[in-house]
Image: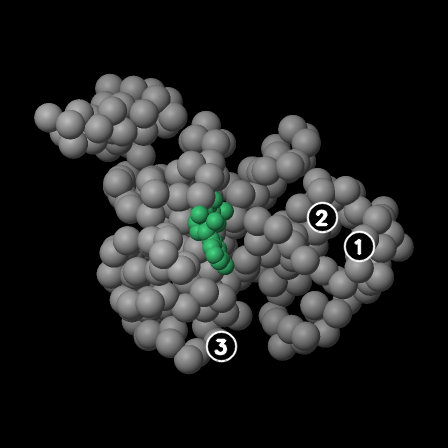
Amino acid sequence: MISVSNIEKRFGSLDVLKSINADFETGRSYALMGPNGSGKTTLIKSILGMVVPDSGKIEVDGESIKGQWTYREKIGYMPQIGRYPDNMTIGQLFEMIKDLRSNANTVDEELIEGFGLDKMMNKRMHTLSGGTRQKVSAALAFLFDPKVFILDEPTAGLDPLAVEVIKEKILKQMGPDKTFIITSHILSDLDDLSSHALYLDNGSLIYNDSIALLKEETGEVRLGKAIATIMKRKQKSVTA
Ligand code: ADP
Ligand code: MG
């Protein structure tokens, strides 16, 4: 369980996260949505300890993450933009990461094969297309069968076939002891992957509940439409 309480983050004069409260419960999958620049990546990086919030508290399994790092071993993280040593080959990168985590119990290489990366092991990172880099990032996030998956725009830049591969893998790994937080700025992307929706708009969380409830409440079948309905209601209540 990941618990975020009253998180605030400013970059200079920019209010990027405004008093965010959210619980991510074990066994559930959360779609973290919102337009570009709404604060999704900043919220995710706060949970990972890569961004330090100005105030508020984040707990993982009941313990504050402040000054901690070992909790990160529970998390498989796919960054929005993966940065890797240019001259390393794909094969060397995977070997290095496995060496670093030699205490890991499981190695799950299904995505390496699913994406066909096993046939590209000698390619150097700087020669890869954006989509192939994304595949490497995804395969790394799943490599040690973590309890928590944090995937930042996992489908962005992937070809349609690869999108199906990663979606199937996500569904396969879901289970009562796993937590997924998946971001996207494309609402239709996460419809079949998540039970819960969080919608960030300009640093504020304007929806945080089950997707079934959201659809029922708005009478919309599609997630994108349901969110749009909520947004319209909000705007009306502001101008009224
Ligand atoms: P999202 O992932 O929803 O697209 P981000 O969390 O990446 O949004 O960014 C939210 C806002 O914070 C944007 O306006 C972005 O430009 C700004 N921002 C993000 N990181 C930094 C940083 N390190 N320094 C200054 N501004 C930043
Ligand atoms: Mg982002």
- Identify residue type, mark 1: Met
Please give the name of the residue rendered at 77% of the width and 67% of the height, measured from the top-left corner: 95
Q: Quadrant of the N terminus?
A: bottom left
Please give the name of the residue rendered at 24% of the width and 32% of the height, measured from the top-left corner: 213
Residue that sits furthest to the front in the current view: 13
- Identify residue type, mark 2: Arg
**Residue picked out by circle 2:** 133
Q: CA distance from mark 2 to mark 1?
A: 8 Å
Q: CA distance from mark 3 to mark 1?
A: 28 Å
The local crowd at label 2, few if under 14, some if 14 to 19, many if 20 or more residues have their Cα within 10 Å, is: many
- Identify residue type, mark 3: Thr
Displayed quadrant of residue 97: bottom right
Q: Position of residue 66 (x, y in %)?
A: 38, 76
Q: Position of residue 163 (x, y in %)?
A: 61, 34
Please give the name of the residue rendered at 24% of the width and 19% of the height, measured from the top-left corner: 219
**Residue picked out by circle 3:** 70
Q: Give whichever of discs 3 and 1 has the lower sequence position.
A: 3
Q: Nearer the viewer, residue 157 or 232?
A: 232
The local crowd at label 3, few if under 14, some if 14 to 19, many if 20 or more residues have their Cα within 10 Å, is: few
